[in-house]
Amino acid sequence: MGDYEKVLNDAGYLYGADSKGMFQSMATLAQQCAMACWDLSKGVELPPVEAISHVVVTGLGGSAIGGDLLRVYCLDRCPVPVLVNRDYTMPGFTGRDTLVFAVSYSGNTEETLSAYREARERGATVIAVTTGGKLKEMADRDGVPVIMVPTGIAPRSASGFLFIPTLRVMERLGFLTGIEKEVEDLVGHLKTLYGRLKPEVPVDKNPAKQMALKLYNRIPVIWGSSGSTEVVAQRWKGQINENAKAPAYWNVFPELNHNELVGFKFPESLLKNIHVVILRDDRDHPRVQKRIEITRSIISGAVAGITDVRASGGGALARTYSLVYSGDYTSLYLAFLYGVDPGPVEVIDHLKNELARD
Ligand code: F6R
């Protein structure tokens, strides 16, 4: 067994060197999702549904990805459009018929606070999702409902807390149905997957550890499919960036067939450093699946490797999260291959501190 496998097989080391308890957050994701579904949004007062013609989730980073999970989940299930806004300003159409989820785990992200203010000024119905901070202060002052999220974990580990209450609100408004069943399914599936992906499971039986070994010393390029795994591709990229402190890039089928794919010719030697991960769901459009097969054959000689990761589970949420969960674990194992602590994101903290100086 090589040194790298040894690192990944030493569960005691992995837990001991994980200063922010990222593995602990992974272990409790199923409970997090259950609590998010059945407790967090209870009692939040909602506007009359006739007043809403579209929904905007505004937030950044780990607080925005839940917005994309909501957007994609709603695509073919919800009668009103859902958009995600990662900016200081709100889209021009924001007005009295807009429902805005202002999501910030810390409650102190300046772009989100600024977008919150603008949403209020434009008369939108706003619901804040946060652990506290300035967002909670402003919402309390403005009489805006707040979905309070438990504190103490990294924002990017809180996707269940930040995303699932928004699903429940959409359900209570009558825009979605069957969320409890979806979350029950998700919770059960996460528990099963935990048994396969956790640090105690050795490399030869643990697909996330195997994936991390493939991505080590390579540039990961993650491809998903529009309207399904696209959000997971973005999540894998973000998690590899923040946890492993490494670059990663993402794109989606079928769009990438019309541009990115053409760029797999040069520079030949650098392309050999790319490992392509294709996120697959058997329920994806059959023509997309066909495209994936053809794309694989086109790039197979050009890159270091290509790995398919397949969704599992019954419900749509469980299937999406099966891929999110394996990407999250992969990024944590990759961090340890690089010898870094996955939790701290000093670069983000530094940037926020610099910006806070004036
Ligand atoms: C840190 C993380 C970041 C933050 C982002 C916004 O774990 O994932 O991407 O989510 O800097 O901060 P919050 O979530 O506090 O609004």
Image: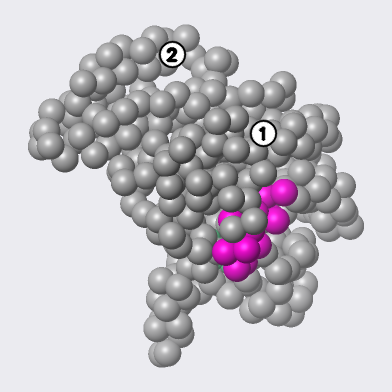
Q: Residue at x 27, y 14 (%)?
A: 297
Residue sitting nearer the eye, 132 or 145: 132
- Dividing the picture into quadrants, the one containing residue 357 is bottom left
* Left or right: 185 in relation to 254: right
Name the side, left or right, on which 24 lies relative to 264.
right
Kind of residue at disc 2: Gln
Q: Residue at x 71, y 69 (%)?
A: 152
15 falls in the magenta region: yes
Q: What residue is disc 1 on?
A: 196
Q: Toward the viewer: 271 or 93? A: 271
Instruction: Specify start and end residues of the magenta stretch as a single range.
Output: 14-27
Q: Circle 1 — which element?
A: helix
* Residue 294 in the image: above or below residue 171: above
Q: Please tell me whether mark 2 sits on a helix, a strand or a loop.
A: helix
Q: CA distance from mark 2 to mark 1?
A: 26 Å
- Image coordinates of residue 118 in percent, x first then y, are 54, 68
Prevalent SS, magenta region: helix
Residue type, mark 1 in image: Arg
Vertical position of residue 223 compared to residue 30: above or below = above
The residue pinned by badge 2 equals 289
285 lies above or below 44: above
Tell me the quadrant of the picture where the C terminus can be found.
Answer: bottom left
**Res 215 seen here:** yes
Q: Is residue 108 magenta?
A: no
- Give the residue drawn at x 49%, y 23%: 280
Q: From the viewer's perspective, is 5 left or right of 163?
A: left
Q: Is mark 2 within 8 Å of ligand 1?
A: no
Q: Is residue 53 left or right of residue 236?
A: right
Disc 1 crowd, CA 10 A, few/some/many (<14, 14-19, 20+): some
